[in-house]
Image (cartoon, grey):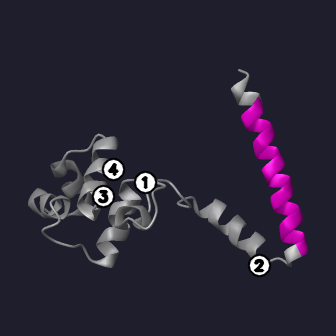
Amino acid sequence: MATFGKRLRECRDAKGLSQQNLAKQMSTSYTVIGKYERDEMTPSIEVAKNLAKLLETTVGYLLGETDEVNVLKDPDMLKRLNDIAALPDADKSHILYTIDNLLASVKTRLAYK
């Protein structure tokens, strides 16, 4: 299982950032970023949130709670999903059925391109 540090480094590398670049954006030193990546130090919740935002991922991914790097980081999408979750079960079921069919249609179309 990947640790916070390994996931942080993976995300930093994926963004093409050096430890120095990330440290500058975080207003800290590269040695602190290195300690996070080596799991020698654990960031505060606020720092973890800022790292996730800068690296375009989620705190949940960095903490190993999910393997999905980009899950629900889009605030507009999260708001829509929360709106759907608040609906009565019958309405929620109809909306999710429609979304599932739209997704299947798009995936099929993309498969034949």
- Three-letter residue code for mark 4: Cys
- Three-letter residue code for mark 1: Glu
Residue corresponding to mark 4: 11
The answer to whether residue 83 is magenta is no
Q: Name the mark nearer the viewer: 4 or 3.
A: 3
Mark-to-mark CA distance, 2 and 3: 34 Å
Residue corresponding to mark 2: 86
- Three-letter residue code for mark 2: Ala
Instruction: Check contact, mark 2 vs mark 1: CB within 8 A.
Output: no
Q: x and y percent of residue 7 in the render?
A: 31, 56
Residue 32 picture quarter: bottom left
Q: x and y percent of residue 62 in the render?
A: 36, 62
Other-residue count near label 4 (Cα within 10 Å), few / some / many at <14 / 14–19 / ≥20: many
Q: x and y percent of residue 97 in the render?
A: 85, 57
Other-residue count near label 1 (Cα within 10 Å), few / some / many at <14 / 14–19 / ≥20: some
Residue corresponding to mark 1: 56
Label 4 residue SS: helix
